[in-house]
Image (spheres, grey):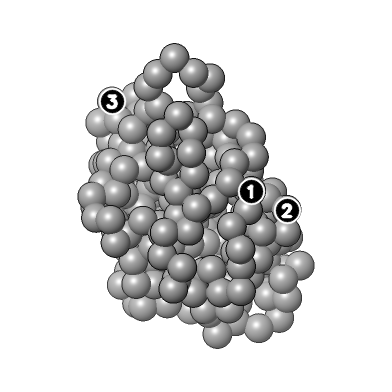
Amino acid sequence: MIAIIDYGMGNLHSVSKAVERLGHEAVITDNPETIAAADGAILPGVGAFGDAMQNLRETKLDEVAKAYAASGKPMLGICLGMQLLFSESEEYGKNEGLNLLPGKVLRFAGDYKIPHMGWNKLSFLQEQSPLFNGLTEGHVYFVHSFHAKPELASDLLATTDYYQQVTAIVGRGNVYGMQFHPEKSGELGMQLLGNFLALTSSQG
């Protein structure tokens, strides 16, 4: 079973349906016991970093997420959920994140269209990552005004180009993040999500 963590911010149902299409049981939940018992956990998210962290703290799901990451079972952050994995964000002032990955989330700055919205090609930096098993580089769908800057190059698995190198996929140990929405990114997005689910012991 895959737990999709419900902290009040996210397109939970589209992620849930994608997990089910890939042959896994998905449960949208804010129950700590259910999350802890899951074979894999997904932290989705749409909205502002500070509001998301406030919701997580008020429901104590921040500690649940940290404990899950420490359990060694696979965990995936999507979009805002990926940004929450980092130490802090500058969105609407400085906000502390889950600090599972060292680094900061910064606003795009430049004379170009913000938010970054559309299909962009991934560049795999660490092709040995299990997320990339059997895959070739292709396009996925982004919608974001802020981007993550990992402190450690080893945590950066894939990038895209939007007037600069932009973090697209991160990972350390059992914790992964995707800035784009894999469930809305066509065949490649579903393959990447499927490779994450293959790391779990979940079956439909």
Residue visible at 42% across and 77% down in the picture: 73
User: Mark 1: which amino acid?
Assistant: His
**Crowd rating for badge 1 (residues with CA inside 10 Å; few <14, some 14–19, many 20+):** some
Classify 187 as above or below 195.
above
Q: Which mark is residue 93?
A: 3
Q: Tell which circle, 2 or 1, labels the residue nearer the N-terminal end.
A: 1
Residue 168 image point, x, y percent: 47, 49
Q: Can I make out residue 122 in this image? A: yes
Q: Tell which circle, 2 or 3, labels the residue nearer the N-terminal end.
A: 3
Quadrant in which the C terminus is drawn: bottom right
Q: Secondary structure at mark 2?
A: helix
Front one among 131 and 135: 135
Q: Nearer the viewer, mark 1 or mark 3?
A: 1
- Residue 73 located left or right of residue 29: left
Q: Nearer the viewer, mark 2 or mark 1?
A: 1
Quadrant in which the N terminus is drawn: bottom right
User: Mark 3: which amino acid?
Assistant: Gly
Q: Tell me whether circle 2 and circle 1 mark residues in contact (CB < 8 Å).
A: yes
Q: Which quadrant holds residue 202?
A: bottom right
Classify 41 as above or below 48.
below
Q: Which mark is residue 51?
A: none
Q: Secondary structure at mark 3?
A: loop
The residue beneath circle 1 is 139
Residue visible at 56% across and 74% down in the picture: 133
Classify 91 as above or below 56.
above
Q: Can I make out residue 13 in this image? A: no
